[in-house]
Structure formats: structure tokens, C-alpha cells
Amino acid sequence: MRFDEGYSGKVFIMSRPEHEKAEAIIYGMPMDWTVSFRPGSRFGPNRIREASIGLEEYSPYMDRHLEEVHYYDAGDIPLPFGNPSRSLSMIYDFTKKIFEQGKFPLGLGGEHLVTWPVLQAAYEKYSDMAIIHIDAHADLREEYEGEVLSHSTPIRKACNLIGPENVYSFGIRSGMREEFQYAKESGMYMAKYDVIEPLKQILPTLQGRNVYVTIDIDVLDPAYAPGTGTAEAGGISSKELLQAIKAIADADVNVIGADVVEVAPVYDPTEKTPIAASKFVREILLGWVKE
């Protein structure tokens, strides 16, 4: 399960050397073939790994140490440059194996379209699943300038797959009028602007459910995460996103997998964006991966 060809050798801090005993598999999806503004998120996975070296292995939020979770960093999937269809197929094939093995897939992006094949693979095993989507953008378009494979479409695709009533979006502050109208009329849940308070209200209704969580780093205000392809003013703080991760960990839901996407490090010479993302990944490992 290692992608040796073209892989730089960087791994997330305290990754175990074998995947057989791993409870979670970290993997990179270095794709930005369909972005509508600034490319560069294909470099996100490795920068998140590099930033993880500066983390403490202990989390005061979760009161757990990374040595308590067995996880394996499989490296980046060697996606064919400029070929979104083939790239999505490769992501699907890889994550399908992870779900079949009963392990927790934790993806590093990459543009947000990479979430779509993971959701397809998850749905094949968990037909009763729900999705928690934390993002600045609605991602509810059916196409972008005639292209149905676009990073502005994964949540609309998810609604079509599992039913809009099973999709819960938080932090949304950007999109077409038609996207907000669809959210209002379709039966999906959308919380505008904020994350933690509406999330706390929704989590009790997801009790006992299998839930996949996708986090777009641009839910953060650009003050906290300027290194992203489509930054959007008016976002939440890193603190609020950490609170959201903790709230999900404390809730009676079964998180079946997750991803953190849209980190584009070239736009952030301060490195605050990959530093924040690496901390979110640590908290996900410690809070959502169950033994």
C-alpha cells in the first residue's frame, strides 16, 4: 500500500512502518487539475507532512498521545497530471481497499473534487452514511463552465448519491444564488458562516450514524489560512475548527473516514496554513480513529 514511485519519503509524524496493523491509513491526493482560481493544492499533502514535524505528539484537547493510535502514511497516490477522470478512478480504487479492510482513511488534498471518489467508495460499504462538510464554499454546482468534474461540484454529487437529507454543511459563506436555493429546497442542512454552534445542535441528531467528514481548509479566514486556492474573507478561526473536531470526537457518531483538502502552500510563505492543517490531522487521528 505504499506509493514508492515519485514519493519523496516524507511521512506524517509518528507514522508506523507497516500498514497491516494500522487502524488508520493516511494518504495524499495531489490533484489540482480542475481548480477555478489558483492552482497549487497538489503540493499540500507533503507540506502538511513536513509541518507535522513541529507538532507535539500529545494533544491536550483529546488528552491522548499519538503513540496510542496505530496509523500508516501510505504516501501520495501517483495521480496522472491533468487527467481528472483517471485520477478520481485511482483514488476510488485505493480508498475502496481501505474501507474493505475496516481501516480509517484520512486523505490529504488536493482540490476538493478528490473527496468525491472517496465518498463513492464509502457509500458502497456504508449505505446509511451521512456527510459532515466544513467549508467556505457550498460546492453544490452541477458543473463549472461546462465541466462536470470540478472542485465546485463534490457536495452536489454527494447529495445525488446519498440523498441531500444526509448532507450537513457548515461554515458556508460563498456560492451561486442557485446553490443556496438548492440547499434550501432540497432538504440538506446548511449552516452559513459559523461552524461550532450549529454543529453542536446537529450532532445529537446524528447519534449512532456512520459519518464521513470532509474539511476544506478555506473554511478558515484567510488570516489563519492564506495558503489555499480560493480564499474567502469572513471565515472562522483555527480555534473554532479545533473545537468542531473535538465536538465530533465527543459525539456519539461513528466517523468512518475524513479528509483535509485545498492546502496550497505556495500562497503562504509564513506556513501557517500547513501548520494548522497538520494540527487538525493530529486531532482527527486522536479523536476520531477508534481502536
Image (cartoon, rainbow, N blue to C red):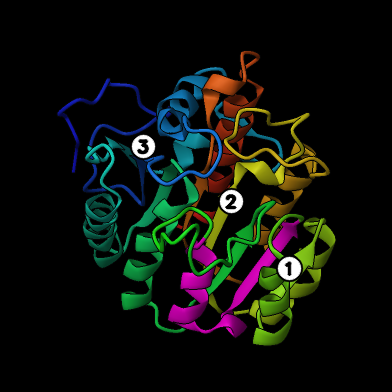
**Residue 203, visible in the rendered structure:** no
Residue located beneath label 3 in the image: 30
Query: Are discs 1 and 2 less than 8 Å apart at CB?
Result: no
Residue at 25% x, 32% y is 17
Residue located beneath label 1 in the image: 177
1 vs 2, front mark = 1
Image coordinates of residue 127 in percent, x first then y, are 40, 83
How far apart in space, not on screen, are marks 1 and 2 (Cα)?
22 Å
Is residue 88 inside the magenta stretch? no
Q: Nearer the viewer, residue 72 or 220?
A: 220
Q: Amino acid at mark 3?
A: Pro
Label 3 Cα crowd, 10 Å radius (few <14 / some 14-19 / many 20+): many
**Residue 150, visible in the rendered structure:** yes
1 vs 3, front mark = 1
Q: Which residues lie in the magenta part?
A: 153-172
Image coordinates of residue 197 in percent, x first then y, are 84, 62
How far apart in space, not on screen, are marks 1 and 3 (Cα)?
30 Å
Q: Is residue 232 above or below residue 135?
A: above
Residue furthest top as drawn: 269
Q: Is residue 234 above or below residue 15?
A: below
Residue at 61% x, 13% y is 269
Taking the image as shown, residue 177 lies to the left or right of residue 23, namely right
- Circle nearer the N terminus (3, 2): 3
- Circle nearer the N terminus (1, 2): 1
Image coordinates of residue 171 in percent, x first then y, are 75, 56
